[in-house]
Image (cartoon, helix red, strand yellow):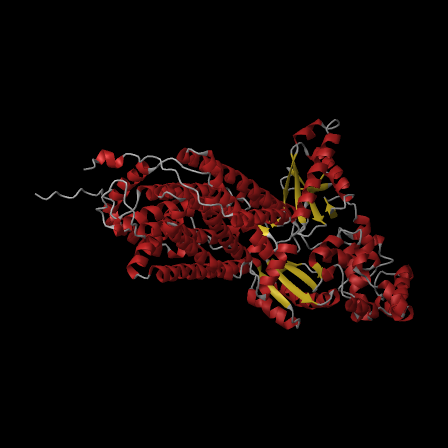
Amino acid sequence: MTSPHDAGAPAPIKPVTRPARAWWAISIWLGALLLGIILVSRASFTADLSAFLPSSPTQEQQLLVEQLRDGMVSRLILVGIEGADAPARAALSKAVAQELRNNKAFLSVNNGEPISEGKDRAYLFNNRYLLSRAVTPERFTEAGLRTALNDTLDLLASPAGLLVKETLAQDPTGEMAELLGQFNSARQPRKLEGVWAAKDGTRALMLLQTRAIGSDTDGQEQAIAEIRKIFESSKAALVPAMPQLAATSMVMSGPGVFSVNARATIADEVTRISIISAVAIMLLLFVVYRSGVALVLGLLPVLSGVLAGVVAVSLGFGVVHGITLGFGTTLIGESIDYSIYLFIQSKSSDQSGDWVKKFWPTIRLGMLTSIVGFASLLFSGFPGLAQLGLYSIAGLVVAACVTRFVLPSLLPANFAVRDLTHIGLRVDSVFQHLQRLRIVVLLLVAASCVFLWVKRDQLWHPELNALSPVSVADQRLDETLRRDIGAPDVRYLIVVKGSTPEEVLQGTEKVAVQLNGLIDQGALSAFESPSRYLPSEATQRMRLSSLPLSATLQERLDRATQGLPFKTGVMTPFMETIDRQAKAAADPAGLKSMLLTRASLDGTSMALATDSLLIQQPAGATGLLPLTAAAGKAIDLELIRSALEKSGVKQAYFIDLKTETDKLYRGYVQEALILSLCGLAAMLILLAFNLRSARRVLNVATPLLAAVIVVAAMLALFGQRMTILHLIGLLLTAAVGSNYALFFDQPNKEKRADDPAGQTPASHRIQPNTLASLAFANITTVLGFGLLGISSVPVLNAIGVTVGPGAILALLFAAVFSSTTYRDAKPPKSNP
């Protein structure tokens, strides 16, 4: 009779006899590795969150996507210079701005210096009759002229009188004053020592426009590097004369800065966590295997799977998102399981080929279950979500195939790893005690269900920025810089689409008429429009046609000035200008030379505003009209939509960017939830097809669902609102857990080391080596996934805090709900 001590003693190490090498498999694998490395070296990587926006959006969502990628603020970089005193900061700001203006990476550089002031005034003054909204045929009637002259008299008596007096002879109707009021409606930054400064005076400010579009992360990164280099070189040049500048520093913000920082952060986090998890897993496996060969061979499926995932996504989508790459590092935690099963479970047989017959069907079913679960993500309308699904499927398939077809052929002759029977027996003992807690676990699951129901309205994060890797500190800095520099708030936006810039400009002018009415009513505070700086050609022609010839103008002016302190002889330059422009407008060649184009704005500060508000694209043009709500009032959405309808512009759309992104995110969550449920349903169907037993399907599914429910409740209990990536983590928990549950469900006809007589029924027996392999596979999974929980990138952290505890619970619950008996076999009673 075998004593309990003997039953628990480690069995002698039994080397595994390697089968004949499958050279065909090795050749295919090596060739695929080489091709994969070549493809990955040419792959493109991005951190642009628009990858997580719909691939087939609605019109409003399409406009939102365009703004996030290449919109009016996507090229802007806000710079703040801190430290030292105001004169030193101003000197440094001027030096940096001068260098940046000579750099081809930037279209415009503004820091408050009057660099383009002369050109701005010249543009406005020389083109005042083309730009002023007041120029209509009525403006130059007798009544119109008299009204304009009276307004000019009022201005002469105001603080602006000196400016008006200088241009009175050329502009008695006050068109320049009209334009200055029209263009100065926007908020202006504070000036200190001749440059823009923060409201509290502690920071010098700059506003830059990059040549690279917002979605060109490489171009943005190069521009940011240029800014830093020029800042440091300018600072070094000024420090000898101004030692206080040594303490200055620079901060930057803007969509391009966020994108570059996000990519760098994700890359750093992925590298750091991958190294930590890889080292931890390798140390653990070395302790387990006591074999360097086994350790190296065990990593081959992992590396192959990660490479396959990157290649598949690159070929399928053209670009690999950084979050997808970060998610792929978790494949280390699951795909390493396959080699663990091979090395440890093969000790139960004399040949590794026997492992294929006895254990591979179970592993294959677990892999297929995971694949079916993730396959549902491929149908997502969000490219980022579909990328995660494709990455996981390709990685797991390749890792499993390398383990099945390549790894056994690479094992050395008489390969053996450390015998783990004693560890398996200890795990056996733990699971034996866990089965006594089945009622407790059922109560925990029931309590979790109740808690989730109570918290159902607070489970999900309501905003899309939950996926953003931008820190709260960076978001606050951006808000502060925007507020100080007067950058537009683009939450409320009217977008006008057209096939040509001219069509768009005409549309924005029609919309502007309605919006001006809302300003008069107090419903709006202000709005921006590209036609303010560059009127449409049709409007310019109309304004020029309003100008009378000199004889007519002289007659009307004589009558209009009666009783007013104006001498018509003083206004000769005015009449000559009007006559010259009226005659030129009547001549086609002269008219063409007078009309303003985008090139007319070159060298002025208004070029930046025009380029930001009028976007020319291969498929057409887009005009943007940011709206500013009246003080203390919210924008009336129905009033805005009514104004757009009255404008008659068919392709004019009002967008509340925050509302639209929130609506988009809710649709995102709903779709992901439906797809995940479909994935779970597909997993159950696959299990039912293979197991062909409702009881066995229930045995496998119960621990998976229990683990998902308890993890979701734990997140809610600790106040963490779930995002899409938490949902993916829950799906992954079910996929990983299916491997454990299937091993507990599979009948094992082999004799246990502690039951050589085979007294325990086959359907209720699981071998110690199998238990040991499950335990160590679980630990490596937790290390691979769980370490993501320390990441500062929210989307990576979400996977870590979900799958880490989920994998542990999936294994424990699989043991608890299993029909397997863990008690040691009792020796048969001897007959008297």
Q: Nearer the viewer, residue 552 or 44?
A: 44
**Residue farthest left in this picture:** 832
Q: Position of residue 601 (x, y in %)?
A: 79, 55
Q: Is residue 428 left or right of residue 558?
A: left
Q: Quadrant of residue 625?
A: bottom right
Q: Position of residue 232 (x, y in %)?
A: 70, 34
Q: Is residue 560 left or right of residue 711?
A: right
Q: Nearer the viewer, residue 386 or 419?
A: 419
Q: Is residue 173 visible?
A: no
Q: Quadrant of the C terminus?
A: top left
Identity of the residue drawn at 63% across and 65% down: 518
The number of numbered badges drawn on the structure is: 0
Q: Nearer the viewer, residue 49 or 396?
A: 396
Does 343 sit above or below residue 559?
A: above
Q: Quadrant of residue 769?
A: top left
Q: Quadrant of the N terminus?
A: top left
Q: Is residue 294 left or right of residue 510?
A: left
Q: Nearer the viewer, residue 156 or 573?
A: 573
Does 619 sit above or below residue 318?
A: below
Q: Position of residue 96 (x, y in %)?
A: 73, 38
Q: Is residue 73 visible?
A: yes
Q: Position of residue 828 (x, y in %)?
A: 16, 44
